[in-house]
Amino acid sequence: MCIRPAGAHRGYGRGVLKVENLTKVFGQVRAVDDLTFDVRPGVVTGFLGPNGAGKSTTMRMMLGLDRPTAGTATIDGRPYRELDHPLRQVGALLDAAWIHPNRSARSHLRWMAASNGIPARRVAEVIDLVGLSSVAAKRAGGFSLGMKQRLGLAGALLGDPHTLLFDEPVNGLDPEGIVWIRGFMRHLAAEGRTVLVSSHLLTEMSLTADHLVVIGQGRLIADSSVTDFTSRATSSVRVRSPQLPDLHRVLAEAGLAVVPGATPDGRPTLSITDVSTEQVGDIAGRAGIVLHELTSTSASLEEVFMSMTAGAVQYQGGGPPAPGPVHPGQWGQGGRQ
Ligand SMILES: Nc1ncnc2c1ncn2[C@@H]1O[C@H](COP(=O)(O)OP(=O)(O)O)[C@@H](O)[C@H]1O
Ligand SMILES: [Mg+2]
């Protein structure tokens, strides 16, 4: 796959996506709450957070589709609406691309190109890039989700933009489609482009991204390399105690991320990430709390993610927020948001 020579987009001083104090309030909901981060060219940046965290809203503000309540989102130092050639600067794959069901893939792209001053020959190039050449003349209405994604991507690439935004691109794709789009995003970044891709799945992000911006309830939780983020997984400590609520409180007061859980036979436990057994034992000892177990375990990536975003899940359905931990079933579920 060759889109353009490696590094062709480097050195332009372009493609920096900057979010500063970005906030969006919908009625009672602070969907995005004072977010500040940069997205740099040349790497894939994963935008990670549970469903409802504010990822899509942030991306919509980056694209001028939602107006910020406060703060700014800029590309090359300017808000989207002020860009001279938006399609040549930013490409986006948001929700399943809108396509006229009776148009062919090729005529849909020709129409997009014509209305944006892009030469028609670029249409054949992008169709080839996304591997749709054999079906370019077919009705797009009959396309599978994977093919629609490819067509949406072809549209995003029409203007050869240096910045690309993908909102949950692997949702609903078959394994082959997931592997393909992952490779494609990595390739776009290797060419020196700025690539921001959102997901609610940490495992997916750890396979795709180099850098992570993690949010929960609209707020920034982490902005670090994937390696740093996942290395937190190596030091998880599990404790049991007849005074578990007291232990939970003193550990939380010590600034530690604590996630309640249970042993396979149902005894309640606490899991603490990014800490040693000595630290946990010392804290318990100082508080006069009896321990029945103090074990060093290796937390899964998903557990690390949960402990970091505990309390940062947007509970939906009208009831009061569920107390305590985030349960694994609340993650990695739900469709496209
Ligand atoms: N147009 C809207 N009107 C009201 N609330 C909205 C709107 N769009 C998003 N929200 C709310 O904002 C929060 C963040 O949503 P969203 O950005 O879609 O999160 P994510 O993409 O991370 O799943 C959610 O609570 C959602 O219900
Ligand atoms: Mg979303």
Image (cartoon, rainbow, N blue to C red):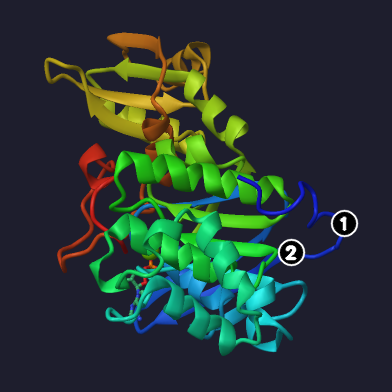
Q: Secondary structure at mark 1?
A: loop
* Percent position of residue 302, x then y: 37, 34
Q: Residue at x 25, y 38 (%)?
A: 328
Which residue position holds label 2?
A: 15
* Marker disc for residue 11: 1
Residue 44 x, y percent position in the rendering: 61, 47
Q: Amino acid at mark 2?
A: Gly
The image shows residue 120, relative to residue 173, as above or below, that is: below
Which kind of residue does numbered mark 1 sit on?
Answer: Gly
Marks 2/1 in contact by CB < 8 Å: the verdict is no
> Dot 2: within a 10 Å radius of its alpha carbon, few (fewer than 14), some, or many (20 or more) residues?
many
Asked if one can make out residue 54 in the rendered structure from this viewpoint, the answer is: no
Question: Would the CB of label 1 be found within 8 Å of ligand 2?
Answer: no
Above or below: residue 172 compared with residue 27:
above
Coordinates of residue 129 in the picture (x, y in percent): 55, 55
What is the C-alpha distance between the residues marked 2 and 1? Answer: 10 Å
Q: Quadrant of residue 138?
A: bottom left
Report whether residue 179 is seen. Answer: yes
Q: Position of residue 213 (x, y in %)?
A: 57, 51
Residue drawn where x is 56% and y is 49% of the image: 185
Q: Describe the element under mark 2 as helix, strand or loop.
A: loop
Quadrant of the drawing holding the N terminus: top right
Q: How many marks?
A: 2
**Quadrant where the image shows the C terminus:** bottom left
Q: Nearer the viewer, residue 39 or 175?
A: 175
78 above or below 175? below
Disc 1: CA contacts within 10 A as few (<14), some (14-19) or many (>=20) = few
Tell me which image quadrant ligand 1 sits in: bottom left
Mark number displayed over residue 335: none
Looking at the image, which residue is at 27% across and 59% down? 144
**Residue, x 33% and y 53% (percent of image)?**
171
